[in-house]
Image: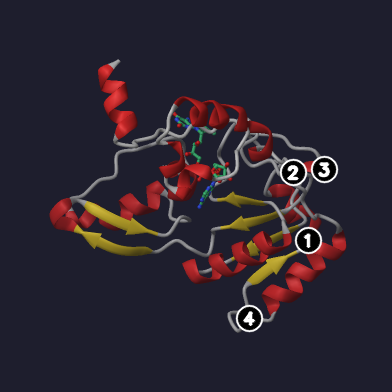
Amino acid sequence: MKRVFDCWEGRFFCVSLKSTTEQFRRLAHLSPAFPQIPQLFLIPTLTHDSLMAPYFYHHLQGDIDNLVAEISKHDNNIEYTLDPSIRNAKSNTLHSPASNQETPLAVFYPTSTQETSIVLRACNERRIAVTAFSGGTSLGGALTSTRGGGVCISFERMQRIVALHEDDLDIVVQPGLGWVELNEQIRDKGLFFPVDPAPGAKIGGMVW
Ligand SMILES: Cc1cc2nc3c(=O)[nH]c(=O)nc-3n(C[C@H](O)[C@H](O)[C@H](O)COP(=O)(O)OP(=O)(O)OC[C@H]3O[C@@H](n4cnc5c(N)ncnc54)[C@H](O)[C@@H]3O)c2cc1C
C-alpha cells in the first residue's frame, strides 16, 4: 500500500484504455494532487468501441478506375492488369479456393520498393484493400480478397538479391524471390537457406 502511495505522490500513472470519466472524477475526489496531474493524463477517453469504428472500403469500379489513373500518372509505368482470368488466379488457387466476390479487381506488378509504396499509398488514400501475392502456395484462403474485391500486389517482378552479407550470414532479398532460386544463387558461396515450406513458395509469402 505504501508503495502505491509513493507512486501516487510521484505522479506515475498507468493509463488504461478502459479509463472512464467517472474514474477520473473519483481520482480527483480522493487526491489533492489531481489538479497537478500532467495534461497528458487528461486525454479524451478511448473505449473499445471507439477503437473498433467501422472501416469502409471503396471497391466500386469507378474507385478502381480512379486508382489506376492515379498510379498511371507516375513516371514509373507500374504494370497492371484488369484481365479476369489473371485476377481470379491471384486469389482462387489450386491449394485454396475463393469465390468471384473474393477476387481482386486489379493486379499490380511493382518492380521496386518505391513502386510498391506508390501503389500502397494510392490504395490507402482511397480506402482500397490490398492483398499481396508471392508464390501462391498458401493454404486456407490466405490469398482471398476478403473485403469484397480490392486489389492485388503481385511480386513476381521483384526477385532480386539486394545485399548479401556473408560475414554474418545475413541476406536482403526482394519478396518475389523463391527459396529454391535463392539457394541456387548462393550455393557457390557454400551457403544454404534451410526453410522449405513447399516448392514454389517465395520469401514474401514465407515471412508474412
Ligand atoms: C504441398 C504444400 C506443403 C506445404 N507445407 C508447408 C509447411 O510445411 N510449412 C508451412 O509453413 N507452410 C506450408 N505450406 C504453405 C505455403 O507453402 C507456405 O505458407 C508458404 O510460406 C507460402 O509462400 P508463398 O510465397 O506461396 O506465399 P503466398 O501464397 O503468395 O502468400 C501467403 C500469404 O502471405 C501474404 N504475402 C505474400 N507476399 C507478401 C508480401 N510481400 N508482403 C506481405 N504479405 C505477403 C499473402 O497475401 C498471403 O496471405 C505448404 C503448401 C503446400 C502447397
Name the amino acid, label 4.
His
Q: Residue furthest bottom?
A: 75
- Locate residue 152 relative to residue 30 in the image: left or right: right
Q: Crowding at label 3, few (<14), some or many (≥20) Cα neighbours within 10 Å? A: some
Task: State how the image is colored.
Answer: secondary structure
Report which quarter residue 164 is drawn in. Answer: bottom left
Of mark 2 and mark 4, the one earlier in the sequence is 4
Q: Position of residue 206 (x, y in %)?
A: 45, 42
Residue at image mark 3: 101
Secondary structure type for disc 4: loop
- Locate residue 114 relative to residue 167 in the image: left or right: right
In three-dimensional space, the C-alpha distance between marks 3 and 1, rounded to whole angstroms, equals 15 Å
Q: Nearer the viewer, mark 4 or mark 3?
A: 4
Q: Nearer the viewer, mark 3 or mark 1?
A: 3
Q: Position of residue 78 (x, y in %)?
A: 62, 73
Name the amino acid, label 2.
Arg
Label total for image: 4
Name the amino acid, label 1.
Asp
Q: Residue at x 54, y 66 (%)?
A: 117
Q: Nearer the viewer, mark 2 or mark 1?
A: 2
Q: Crowding at label 2, few (<14), some or many (≥20) Cα neighbours within 10 Å? A: some
Q: Nearer the viewer, mark 2 or mark 3?
A: 2
Say if residue 65 shows up in the picture: yes
Of mark 3 and mark 1, the one earlier in the sequence is 1
Residue at image mark 1: 83
Q: Residue furthest left?
A: 167
